[in-house]
Image (cartoon, coloured by chain):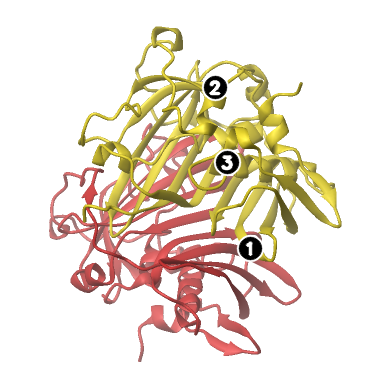
Chain colours: A red, B yellow
Amino acid sequence: MSHPFDQATVVEKVDGVFRAHTHPAYNNMVGPFGGITAATVVAALQAHPDTQGHPLSLTINYAAPISNGEWDITITVLRTNRTNQHFTFLIEQGDGAVASGTAVFGIRRDTWSATELEFPQVGAPEDYPELPFPEFIEWAKNYETRFVEGSLQLEGPQDSSTTTLWLRDKPARALDYPALASLADAFFPRVFLRRGTYLPAGTISLTTYFHASPAELEQQSDDYLLGTARGARFGHGHFDQYAQLWSRNGTLLATTHQIVYYKDPSA
Amino acid sequence: MSHPFDQATVVEKVDGVFRAHTHPAYNNMVGPFGGITAATVVAALQAHPDTQGHPLSLTINYAAPISNGEWDITITVLRTNRTNQHFTFLIEQGDGAVASGTAVFGIRRDTWSATELEFPQVGAPEDYPELPFPEFIEWAKNYETRFVEGSLQLEGPQDSSTTTLWLRDKPARALDYPALASLADAFFPRVFLRRGTYLPAGTISLTTYFHASPAELEQQSDDYLLGTARGARFGHGHFDQYAQLWSRNGTLLATTHQIVYYKDPSA
């Protein structure tokens, strides 16, 4: 039996498109978990015969929920430069577009390097007990989550929207770019923490920058990642949240940003 | 005489595309300033007859430099929902694609609101002298810049890539969404500060989230904005930087992120 993540992100080339399908293990409230959709796009981009290099940047806009069943990714190679390659993609299901986006792949060269963000001061993953998301969030069962702060055990409104946690695929699985794309969306909407309750919310646009080199992914293997996420401004029915994913040894593997729709029934 | 910004971002509907043109006042090292390209896209989206609401999110990928002269924006309305609208766009010049991206417009509703990021503790704009970018950066002459820290008066490598400054269009101009899109890219590549020198660098992908409501733009009018920008990880020929733009009274008008290519001749 292959890993559920591999089952969920498999794509097949059919009539010039990459055909994907929803997987019940990655269901969200309405439609599939956005992270698994993003991961499937990355898998399709990697499977494209003209692709060069590895993912640098992915932006995916979720225009409508994906229904259970097959869906198609049409990839356009917009331009291939010496050190990077630009793509656009369109996701359709039935007669309609349900998502779209852009991606950039790049060739990584050795250069001067530095990580300016500070690695969060937290204990080792083994210091925190495994604490799952609530039972009804199906996709989260595919992640082992050990919260440092800001879990979904909501105890009323709080002033901070920060979640920091150790996490990895469950069962453990060696990290690759599709898995990193999915993990970048594994932070639930920050507004739940601020309001202390669940409310209708959904990602509109998600952007992830892939900092990890192939060698760093190999070094990471199936170890825990440290994720930390926070919101910036909430208002007028939308908020943004941004997050970082680190390795245990302080390698910044990815940074990610999203803008989220929310409906506040109390307003 | 209209404002240079309005001259530079004017679009004309020709044969189903929006035709734009480069403007010498917004030249960058190679091709136009990325901010003015983004601003022109926002202007074209606003001019589209089917557009509803106001900008929420814009991602633009710069695939190749734009040459002096005309360029065309093809806009596709991907999907119109009740409270938001999804677009894709393609920028072509001559026979080739030079940029592409996605945008989301939205209807703003009154909801619970909060700004979680802290407004930087700095003096008023009038407390800092006007300090322009270096003479050879043509586009920057259209901005009045008053640096709090991290100017382009480079004095060797430094540990922080942070720039904080008050800025506005020069001559002053009432803020609108295109101008906000341009200001979001008015932070030069953070690697210049870290390396203490200019080096080849260019934005690959830029994402801006527009938090400002139309009423907040009106309140802002032509006053200064406080901008602050920082890099996260530099390495393998790429880095990301993220920034915030605030009003004088602490309204978070926009958050923005970009991934940038750089070439380090010393490496």
Marks 3 and 1 belong to one chain? no
Which callout, 1 or 2, points to the residue nearer the camera?
Answer: 1
**x, y percentage for residue B172?**
61, 17
Q: Residue at x 32, y 59 (%)?
A: A211
Q: Which residue is mark 2?
A: B168
* Figure quadrant of residue A213: bottom left
Question: Relative to A218, is A109 above or below?
Answer: above
Q: Nearer the viewer, residue B28 or B190?
A: B28
Q: Which residue is mark 1?
A: B97
Q: In the visual, does B174 lie left or right of B18?
A: left
User: The residue tagged with tag 1: helix, strand or loop?
Assistant: strand
Q: Which residue is mark 3?
A: A238
Q: Earlier in the sequence, mark 1 or mark 2?
A: 1
Q: Nearer the viewer, residue A113 or A6?
A: A113
Question: Label 2 amino acid?
Answer: Arg
Q: Residue at x 22, y 43 (%)?
A: A118
Do the CB atoms of the residues marked 1 and 2 lie less than 8 Å apart? no
**x, y percentage for residue B52?**
77, 44
Disc 3 is attached to a residue of which chain? A
Q: Residues within 10 Å of mark 2 (few under 14, many from 20)?
A: many
Question: Label 1 amino acid?
Answer: Ala
Question: Label 3 amino acid?
Answer: His
User: The residue tagged with tag 3: helix, strand or loop?
Assistant: strand
**x, y percentage for residue A43?**
45, 77
Which quadrant holds the N terminus of chain B? top right
Residue B210 seen in this snapshot: yes
Q: Residue at x 86, y 57 (%)?
A: B15
Do the CB atoms of the residues marked 2 and 3 lie less than 8 Å apart? no
**x, y percentage for residue A80?**
51, 70
CA distance separating discs 1 and 2: 31 Å
